[in-house]
Amino acid sequence: MFWVIVVAMAVVVGGAALVALGGGGSLPEAVHDRIAARLPQERPLTRTDVDEIRLPMAVRGYRMDEVDDVLDRLGAELAYRDTRIAELEAAVAAAAPGTGTVDDAPGPVDQK
């Protein structure tokens, strides 16, 4: 009986070693999980572009390099838009006399 148990254990250990070394077949190649919809490079981003982004999952969460790229791009575009808005608001304020309200606008000139 002792030899039967030893042989059974040897078969189990040998089978496990064979599978661990790839003798029992191999796993299929891993599918590269990447962003399906890339951010457009030729135009400014829209709300729809941001809503359609689905960041791929990696073994331990998101792929940090792709998340960093998306966040860097969004941050740069937001900074550009904030700067442009500030420039346009300054230009409007400089062009309008007074506070820029309708009450400050010059009225019609009386010709007598």
Image (tube, rainbow, N blue to C red):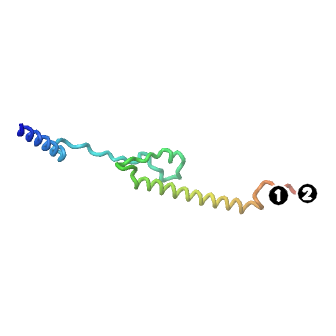
Left or right: where 52 falls relative to 6: right
Left or right: where 47 falls relative to 23: right
Residue at point 41%, 53% (across, down): 66
Which amino acid, by three-letter code, is at mark 2?
Gln
Name the mark on residue 111: 2
Estimate the x, y position of residue 67 in percent, counting from the top left: 43, 53
Residue at point 75%, 58% (across, down): 100
Task: Name the quadrant of the C terminus.
Answer: bottom right
Estimate the x, y position of residue 101 in percent, counting from the top left: 77, 55
Left or right: where 11 falls relative to 106: left
Quarter assignment of residue 29: top left
Estimate the x, y position of residue 2 in percent, counting from the top left: 6, 39
Name the mark on residue 106: 1
Q: Residue furthest right?
A: 112
> Considering depth in this image, is 83 or 44 the residue closer to the camera?
83
Which amino acid, by three-letter code, is at mark 1?
Pro
Element type where label 1 sits in the image: loop
Residue at point 51%, 57% (across, down): 75
> Considering depth in this image, is 94 or 13 the residue closer to the camera?
13
> Considering depth in this image, is 89 or 17 the residue closer to the camera?
17
C-alpha separation, residue under disc 2 versus residue under disc 1: 15 Å
Task: Name the quadrant of the N terminus.
Answer: top left
